[in-house]
């Protein structure tokens, strides 16, 4: 028997994150979103509370929390605004957990420890102007030159591009080898030839920084190479297993925010002599929101249990990301519909929820890609091999 009751520690994580969001994000997010303002001091406060090192072992400066707790953090932060869950995705999921799995001891002490403590911000650089889902076709190059690699190229749609300190970047050392020529590197802000810029005019996630990275003969020391030459593609895919989990968990939070706003408005607004919520078709939309939230959360926890055991969860994480992000978009659409004309303005938060929801069905694998992944598993065209991954001890989530 599996007991799905959260432990006291996990409940405390959820409550702490909810209280943080209520005090530090919700009173200001409408203004920040309107102005496109990024407030790094909020990220610093997340670091002080241990959020930025949540699943990292205490030995490396983290809080040593399990993956259910990480999911709860992401869920609560995205209930407030997607931009703050994005920090968890790129800093923790895509970068820090990848260093924990693949980095050398030297790299863990130089980069992972300050990241887990919240002293440095980190992000992930895979996507390029002409390369998104086709991640094996990278154009950014890395040429070995003595005790360093020389990087040339660019990355785009990189979260925290203009505010991060450390960048986990992927480049090809040999294009003729396809994905087997890709290698991973840690680039540090301030390295000569490295620069970044911010993308303006985004539909959503306006309180978060998204931008471009440029590499013009950037010399990266050999000791900053993560893994061996040619292991970069495998490293990137394992990183996405972690990042997609945070995206899925966050999407549950966004859907929950849509539901909460819709329920409140459905009781406040009256039409035809009764509350909007009393109308059958509004009930249908509300019921479907709740149904999908419960199902999505269980899919996330299924992936979390595997991650807590140190087992590969590519299929389960992909399924959670696909389902939860698609459901969040539908919840946002229905929330706007329930609010009527008011839902079309920023007087109510559902307008922001709708704009924010769309990005997650594109990044970290489009819904179309995840559809194909799931089909391939079901048809037997795809099967996973064990992947080395240090387990994060579970804290009583699975009992019985």
Image (cartoon, grey):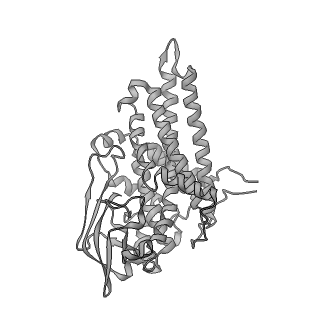
State the count of labels: 0
Task: Tell me: residue 286, above or below residue 111.
Answer: above
Task: Pick whichever, 321 or 23, lies toward us.
Answer: 321
Q: Nearer the viewer, residue 236 or 49?
A: 236
Instruction: Name the quadrant containing residue 68.
Output: bottom right
Q: Image point 61% across, 58% down: which residue?
A: 377
> Residue furthest toward the bottom?
146
Observer-nearest of 210 and 137: 137
Residue 169 found in image quarter: bottom left
Task: Kindly identify the residue that appears in the image at 48 percent across and 17 percent down.
Answer: 270
Q: Position of residue 171 (x, y in %)?
A: 36, 72
Q: Is residue 117 visible?
A: no
- Image quadrant in which the N terminus is located: bottom right
Q: Is residue 389 above or below residue 7?
A: below
Q: Is residue 301 visible?
A: yes
Asked where in the image residue 286 lies, by quadrant, the reply is top right
| Residue 163 locus on image (x, y percent) | 31, 60
The residue depicted at 46 percent of the width and 76 percent of the height is 231
Residue 215: give x, y in percent of width and height: 26, 69
Q: Is residue 320 left or right of residue 352?
A: right
In percent of width and height, residue 391 lies at 60, 69
- The quarter of the picture where the C terminus appears is bottom right
């Amino acid at each position: 028997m599996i007991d799905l009751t959260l432990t006291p520690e996990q409940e405390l994580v959820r409550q702490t994150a909810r209280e943080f969001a209520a005090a530090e994000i919700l009173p200001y997010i409408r203004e920040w979103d309107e102005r496109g303002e990024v407030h790094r001091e909020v990220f610093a406060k997340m670091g002080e509370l241990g959020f930025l090192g949540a699943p990292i072992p205490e030995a490396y400066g983290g809080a040593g929390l399990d993956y259910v707790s990480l999911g709860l953090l992401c869920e609560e932060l995205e209930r407030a605004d997607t931009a703050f869950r994005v920090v968890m995705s790129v800093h923790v999921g895509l970068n820090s957990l990848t260093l924990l799995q693949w980095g050398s001891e030297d790299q863990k002490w130089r980069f992972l420890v300050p990241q887990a403590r919240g002293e440095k911000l980190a992000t992930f650089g895979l996507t390029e102007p002409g390369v998104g889902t086709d991640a094996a076709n990278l154009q950014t190059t890395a040429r070995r030159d003595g005790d360093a690699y020389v990087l040339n190229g660019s990355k785009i749609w990189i979260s925290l591009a203009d505010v991060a300190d450390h960048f986990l970047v992927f480049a090809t050392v040999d294009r003729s080898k396809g994905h087997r020529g890709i290698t991973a590197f840690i680039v540090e802000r301030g390295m000569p030839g490295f620069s970044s810029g911010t993308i303006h005019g985004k539909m959503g996630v306006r309180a978060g920084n998204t931008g471009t990275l440029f590499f013009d003969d950037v010399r990266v020391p050999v000791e900053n190479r993560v893994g061996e030459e040619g292991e970069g593609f495998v490293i990137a895919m394992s990183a996405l297993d972690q990042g997609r989990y945070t995206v899925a968990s966050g999407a549950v939070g966004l859907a929950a925010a849509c539901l909460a706003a819709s329920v409140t408005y459905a009781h406040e607004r009256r039409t035809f002599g009764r509350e909007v919520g009393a109308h059958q078709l509004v009930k249908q939309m509300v019921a479907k929101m709740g149904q999908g939230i419960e199902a999505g959360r269980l899919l996330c926890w299924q992936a979390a249990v595997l991650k807590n055991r140190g087992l590969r969860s590519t299929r389960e994480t992909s399924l959670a990301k696909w389902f939860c992000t698609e459901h969040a978009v539908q919840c946002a659409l229905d929330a706007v519909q329930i609010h009527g004309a008011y839902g079309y303005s920023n007087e109510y938060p559902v307008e922001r929820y709708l704009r924010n929801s769309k990005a997650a069905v594109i990044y970290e694998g489009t819904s179309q890609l995840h559809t194909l992944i799931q089909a391939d598993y079901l048809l037997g065209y795809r099967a996973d091999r064990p992947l080395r991954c240090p387990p994060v001890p579970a804290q009583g989530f699975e009992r019985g």
